[in-house]
Amino acid sequence: MVHLHFELREGIIVASKSLVEICFHGRGGQGAVTAANLLASAALQDGNKGVQAFPLFGAERRGAPVRAFARISEEEIHLRSEIYNPDIVIVLDESIMEIVDVLKGVKPSGKILINTRKKPQDFEFSKQYHVATVDATGIALKYDILVGGIPVVNTPILGSVPKILNRVTLKSIQQAINSKWTTKKELIERNVNATQDAFDQTEVNF
Amino acid sequence: MTIMMDTGNRIAAKAAVMARPEVVAAYPITPQTTLVEAIAEYVANGEFKGEYICVESEHSAMCACIGASAAGSRTFTATSSHGLLLMHEMLHWAALARLPVVMCNINRVIGPGWNIWVDENDSISQRDTGWIQIYCSSNQEIYDTVIQAFKLAEHQKIVLPVMVNLNAFILSHTSMPAEIPDQQTVDDFLGKYTPHWKLDIDNPTTFGNIIGPEYYFKIRRAMQEAQMNAKHLIPQIAKDWKKASGYFHGDLFEYYKCDDAEHILLSMGAIGAESKIAIDELQEAGHKVGLARLRVFRPFPTEEVRKLGKQANLIVIDRNISIGSEGALFNEVKAALYGESEAKATGFIAGLGGKDVTYKDIETMCQKAIQGTAKEQVWYGMEE
């Protein structure tokens, strides 16, 4: 059985027994599904036996709000249903928050990671939730991670995740990026550097 | 041995290619598309060395598989929903011609109204075609079952096509880790395919010609015997694969915490995995309830259901409905129990059209059945 017991240790979630559920919010084409997959792969690398990554089931349109999900557990995961009460919410596109309630169902102990130039305390809900911020768009531009001239934020923002979840290491995230694009050495290097930069730049209110 | 972290579809494709079919013929349909795309990638990178035939419809896909199999080739295809329905005539053909084609079907809703999510009406509506039907609940099970399906289909005591079913999106598009054995392990397990019969220009014979009632009767009887043989061979092959790979997901059923159970839940597909959490919670709350996840729907495990009926009352969840009757699994479970058991059976229809079925839903269904407050057959979530 999957128990949900969380404790806070120096501001970092320590899931004493297993399951962490993560919800990515983004727009079609921003790579939310890829981000969920990379994060789950990294978590597997870090010794979490049960990992899952899945899209919101159905069709996607470029630019429309999309969600993707990941589960990370020390044990095999038997859950096959959707995620209704995430422990962590990752917002790839700040403007989504005007049209989608990204806090819907989030556990009281939940953490919200946002791609933004603002600080955690700039968000009203930071009084209630743990909030982490990083300028993933700025980092994507800095490292020239672009598709069709548009900054791709899904890999940079993953660099911030180890700051709020100690079950995944930056090293494994970088390894996951490495094995996804094995043939494109130069691209990998830029993505890996971007994750390091995101890790260093992440600000938290806890 | 490597760990592959990928979707059910891509892991099914990996298994199919590692079984070294000589021919794959397929037509894309959501949500099967990424499976056949993955096989196309294996063609491009040289990992798949067989013939990959892009056809113009699913009917043609199955025809091409029938032709290739009749010529003595190991053959694979994949489809879903309306694609499977378009194959219907040729599904009968493949089974009656005793051709060991292996196919993945991604369980998807039938329209209209148009819907690409999961339920099992597509494959359930093909239950009388003579195909062996297996239902998976995890990506690891998909890999292991596709490999075993070839062994099963080609076994000289079976020689029937096998359909490996995986739920749309919940499995087809969900990434989970699966351990992939090395090629040698798969080669050793499957061996070289020796066709039971084949079209051979050096030994000309005729197949599928006009025959009278007496011989036709024998053909049907032989198919039935082959399916009955599968009841013994599926557990044997599962055991052999466990020896080769270390993985075992059950045989006809996967039993979970059934010791001392006074109520046993029967479910299949992804609901079968989610059910384990419901059973854990119900047992923790003091209920004597266990799970029998049905893996094999054809041949139907009649004897095993009777055994369960001697031990406990049965709770059945169907993600399908035989309109005008009831859920297909519920229907068959009751038929198996007839005259053999006093067990009470309660059936639930749940998750049609892709409606999510959570472990909390499964707990609620079990509790209703245990308390005896459920009617014989309940449409879960719309009782009002």
Image (cartoon, coloured by chain):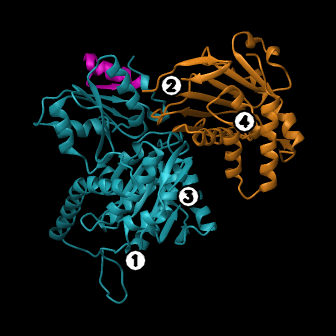
Q: Compared with residue B68, is residue B269 higher up or lower down, i.e. above or below?
A: above
Q: Amino acid at mark 1?
A: Ala
Q: Nearer the viewer, mark 4 or mark 3?
A: 4
Label placed on residue A17:
2
Question: Residue B40 at what x, y percent from top left?
Answer: 59, 63
The answer to whether B299 appears left or right of A147 in the picture is left
| Marks 4/1: CA–CA distance | 52 Å
Label placed on residue A158:
4
Residue drawn at x 71%, y 44% as measured from the top left? A174
- Residue at mark 2 shares a chain with residue at mark 3: no
Query: If you read the primary sequence from the N terminus, does the residue marked by circle 3 or circle 1 appear first?
Result: 3
Q: Which chain is cyan in the picture? A: B
| Marks 4/3: CA–CA distance | 30 Å
Question: Residue B351 at what x, y percent from top left?
Answer: 44, 32
Q: Are marks 4 and 3 in contact (CB under 8 Å)?
A: no
| Label 3: chain letter | B
> Bounds of the magenta span?
B361-381
Question: Residue B265 at what x, y percent from top left?
Answer: 30, 30
Q: Nearer the viewer, mark 4 or mark 1?
A: 4
Return the residue at label 1: B71
